[in-house]
Image (cartoon, grey):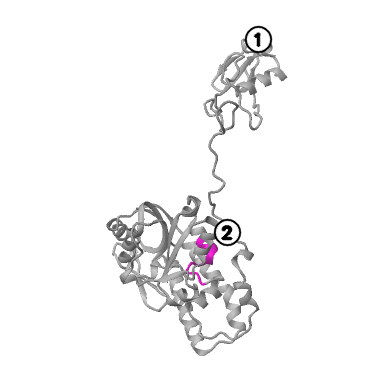
Amino acid sequence: MKKILGKMASKLKTERSEMVVEGGSIGVRKKLMAWWRGADLVVRSGEDRARKVKIRKPVGKEPPPGGKGGTAKQGQSAKASGGPSAKVKGSGGAAPRPDPNLPKARRLTPKELGEAEEGLKDDKSPIQNLDDGALMTHLWGAASRTPGGINGAIEILEPIIQGMDPHKKVLDVFAGDGRLNKFLETYHQADCTGYEVSQNLVDKSSGKVRHFDPNRANFGEEQYDYVCAAEGMQDIEEKQKVLQAIANSMKVGGKMVLVDALTQSSEGHAPYMARLDGFLAPVLSARFYKKILEECGLKVIGTKNITRDYQTRITNGWGKATKLFQDRSMDSASKKFLNEQATHHFDRLKSLQEQEAKMIRLEIMK
């Protein structure tokens, strides 16, 4: 076979990735030779009309380097011959492959999300003493700050989750009831610490989340590899204090995913966005926000406008919860709280719809 192929090769000439035959038909042996050299066969007739035939190489095999009748040397990797990574006898092992233990972003199934949402559907008892945590549970199945609940947070934090090695230290700011912490610990072997400004949500976390005051934020010194701030910063007036505390807690080279509202206005603190407690929180311009981050020793390495997703999740949450509120009686205090929060969300959606502000996911590195 080697002699036959060598004889054929003397009649062929190579033009880039093509093997040209001056007349004749393309038989099995010529196809084999083309496959062996990783080229296309072209037959030129007397009228100089070309007919190209694409020869597909078998998956998992590599042709040896070019040359008349040459064979691949043992010990030469597929990478060196220009092909994709593959294990070659004598190469000392396989080419690097993705570590199967590295976590991948994934949505939780309804079963994994727990019974909270299903329990709300079945429960017909009166709603009393509605607070922010209970309202969030009605909206997205958990006392989570992120619209869309835990799956919404997973999608936002994908840049961190995809690159997170197991057993890394993670700081979750605005952690809600700690559901995201539990997800990262269970499915990504992370060592998580959560902080939250709402005492109601801290109480619902069963000791998994710590309370912090934005004016006196302190998350420790240079101990975290990753920081999650998927929701909540747009409700904070003391942004620079919180961002500085986060920066202080990050290791050099650490990464953070932060969601906040930005405006295209050239002024630093206009317009304002409705906050859960009824007050107005400042929306900063992109230029002013970048200045704050630089002063904190942080730099932006990626951005994504998530306004449409944010609006959709809030709208879907309210749509899903509306029937629950209609079917169950409520005490007067809960009705008042619900009306206030409905107004808040409506105002926030209106602000985003009118493009006075937009929700941005910032990927940040120290």
Instruction: Using the numbered discs, state the Cα–Cα distance from disc 2 to disc 1 in whole angstroms.
Output: 59 Å
Identify residue type, mark 2. Answer: Arg
The reply to whether residue 274 is in sight is: yes
Q: Which residues are magenta?
A: 143-153
Which quarter of the picture shows residue 85? top right
Q: Which residue is mark 2?
A: 107
Residue 224 % position (x, y): 39, 57
Q: Which residue is mark 1?
A: 7
Q: Is residue 151 magenta?
A: yes
Q: Residue at x 33, y 63 (%)?
A: 245
Q: Is residue 359 above or below residue 205?
A: above
Q: Residue at x 72, y 20 (%)?
A: 28
- Element under disc 2: loop
Looking at the image, tell me whether mark 2 or mark 1 is earlier in sequence order: 1
Q: Is residue 98 above or below residue 109?
A: above
- Element under disc 1: helix
Q: Is residue 339 above or below residue 352?
A: below
Residue 125 % position (x, y): 61, 85
Residue 288 % position (x, y): 30, 60
Q: Residue at x 34, y 62 (%)?
A: 220
- Identify the image quadrant of the N terminus: top right
